[in-house]
Image (cartoon, rainbow, N blue to C red):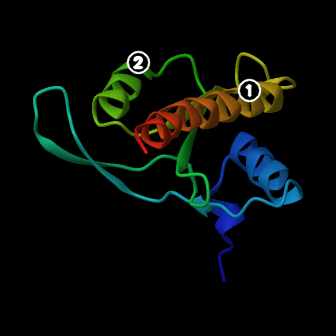
Amino acid sequence: MVSIYDRMTKPEREVAHYLKQAGLHWEFEFPVFVFDEHKRPRLFIPDFYLRELGVFIEVCGSEKFDYNRRKNVYEENGIAVVFLHYYKHPTKWSFFLEKKITEIEQQRQTEACKLMAQG
């Protein structure tokens, strides 16, 4: 039987282990429906989905791939995705992940406060 970890790259396995150690439940290659830059429906499959946080993680393993297009499509669709450029910082990615998730949660808190101010 093939394990889910057998389908992962080394950087993805490291991220999976880190998330598990942090007590965060994750789903691997959870598909998400988006409209691309030409408003065409597409199915993208980021590496991880943190359901409790509503955040996706894309582990960027190569500088040869242009991640900007995907980043722009996700932003246009209002989908929170953290792009971990593992190949740039193989020892510092966890700090970046923590920082980005904290920023996303702070932005969500700011938006929620707008609703509470109306009440």
The kind of residue on which mark 2 rests is Asn
Q: Position of residue 3 (x, y in %)?
A: 69, 73
Position of residue 62 relative to residue 8, above or below, is: above
Determine which residue is flagged by label 2.
68
Judged from the image, the secondary structure of the residue bearing numbered disc 2 is helix
When asked about the image quadrant of residue 77, the answer is: top left
Q: Position of residue 2 (x, y in %)?
A: 65, 76
Q: Which label number is shown at residue 99?
A: 1
Residue depicted at 66% across the width and 83% down the height:
1
Label 1–label 2 contact, CB within 8 A = no
Looking at the image, residue 74 sits to the left or right of residue 41; the answer is: right
Instruction: Say which quadrant the C terminus sits in.
Output: top left
Position of residue 59 relative to residue 63, above or below, is: below
Calculate the distance from the C-alpha at mark 1 to the C-alpha at mark 2: 20 Å
Give the class, few, some or many, for how many residues have Cα within 10 Å of label 1's Cα (few <14, many ≥20): few
Residue depicted at 56% across the width and 16% down the height:
63
In this rendering, does residue 66 appear at all? no
